[in-house]
Amino acid sequence: MRFENKTAVVTGGSRGIGLAIATKLAKEGANIAILYVGDENEGIKAKEELSQYGTKVEQYFCDVSNFEESKKVVDQVIEEFGSIEILVNNAGITRDKLVLNMDEKDFDAVINVNLKGTFNMIKHTYKHFMKKRYGRICSTASIVGLTGNAGQANYSASKAGIIGLTKSVAKELAGRGVTANAVAPGYIATDMTSVLPDKVKDAMKAQIPAKRIGTPDDVADVVAFLCSDDAAYVTGEVIRVDGGLAM
Ligand code: NAD
């Protein structure tokens, strides 16, 4: 029960990797606030699922790329839960195209959700963590933020940006008991990757040294470690969770 009496905000917590993270934290005692967009039934179902572990759970329909909207929701979570100890910036989207075919909207949309959304959430919780002299920030980057990927210039740039943001915030807040880290997943089986053509999936799987596609739980276990007090002296770190793919 590493997260008893702690509240975790998990963006993109309604499904996939985010729901696995929220589940892992709730199982170990955390109160959970999930933020998501899209189908409201998904958020309601996720809340029901997460509630079985007996902690306080709430779901908030909130676009993290919107500065004002995300500020309102963070303030509301602090009001309703009393405080926030853990921030997991996991919301993310893709709009894959070669730069040749990528227009400004494709670039802006991905940067706004993935990178600016992460900035917004850190900005809104920053003073709260400073005052508490405690905080765990963990953001979901990607191995393509380290390696780049043809067809994902917008997404790779957003994830590389998350790594730079994480390291900078880690340096700013290290003296205040606040850590900021990131995970860089490889190929994980979720809705995001289910849309890839089978040919691409098979080619990717063949390249993974661990010989299997990752699961959301593979990522959640590492995020939980980084959000726990076991990782109190780990900050500014990026941990690949990729079965050795980007080794
Ligand atoms: P997913 O598409 O299954 O889930 C995405 C989640 O983000 C949903 O809950 C959705 O509501 C939320 N979201 C999207 N836009 C949002 C917005 N503007 N505001 C608030 N919430 C928003 O994706 P996933 O595969 O679970 O990915 C989760 C994270 O992991 C993403 O940041 C993704 O880039 C990253 N990632 C995934 C993989 C993979 O292989 N699946 C690999 C590396 C990194």
Image (cartoon, rainbow, N blue to C red):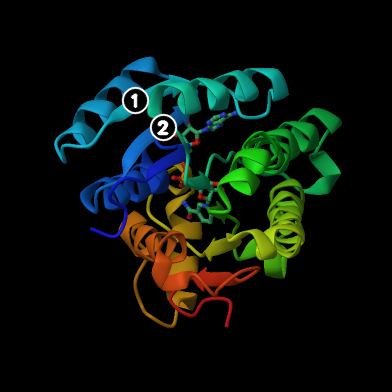
Write down the residue under mark 2. Answer: 34
Position in image of residue 165 (x %, y %)? 74, 55
Quick check: marks 1 and 2 in contact, CB under 8 Å? Answer: yes
Identify the mark nearer the N-term, 1 or 2: 2
| Residue pictured at 42% horizontal, 42% vertical | 8
Disc 2 within 8 angstroms of ligand 1 (CB): yes
Residue in the foreground of this view, choosing between 21 and 54: 54
Write down the residue under mark 1. Answer: 58
**Dividing the image into 4 quarters, which one contains the C terminus?**
bottom right
**Dividing the image into 4 quarters, which one contains the N terminus?**
bottom left
Q: In the rendering, which numbered label is found on residue 129? A: none
The amino acid at mark 1 is: Glu
Query: Dot 2, how many residues are within 10 Å of its Cα: few (below 14), some (14-19), or many (20+)?
Result: many
Query: Dot 1, how many residues are within 10 Å of its Cα: few (below 14), some (14-19), or many (20+)?
Result: many
The amino acid at mark 2 is: Ile
188 versus 212 height, above or below: above
54 versus 100 height, above or below: above
Residue in the foreground of this view, choosing between 203 and 17: 17
149 versus 84 height, above or below: below
SS class, disc 2:
strand
Residue in the foreground of this view, choosing between 243 and 30: 30
| Residue pictured at 69% horizontal, 68% vertical | 146
Q: Is residue 38 visible?
A: no
Position in image of residue 228 (x %, y %)? 40, 62
75 versus 124 height, above or below: above
SS class, disc 1:
strand
Measure how far apart labels 1 and 2 are at the Cα level.
6 Å
| Residue pictured at 64% horizontal, 59% vertical | 176
Q: Is residue 28 left or right of residue 114?
A: left
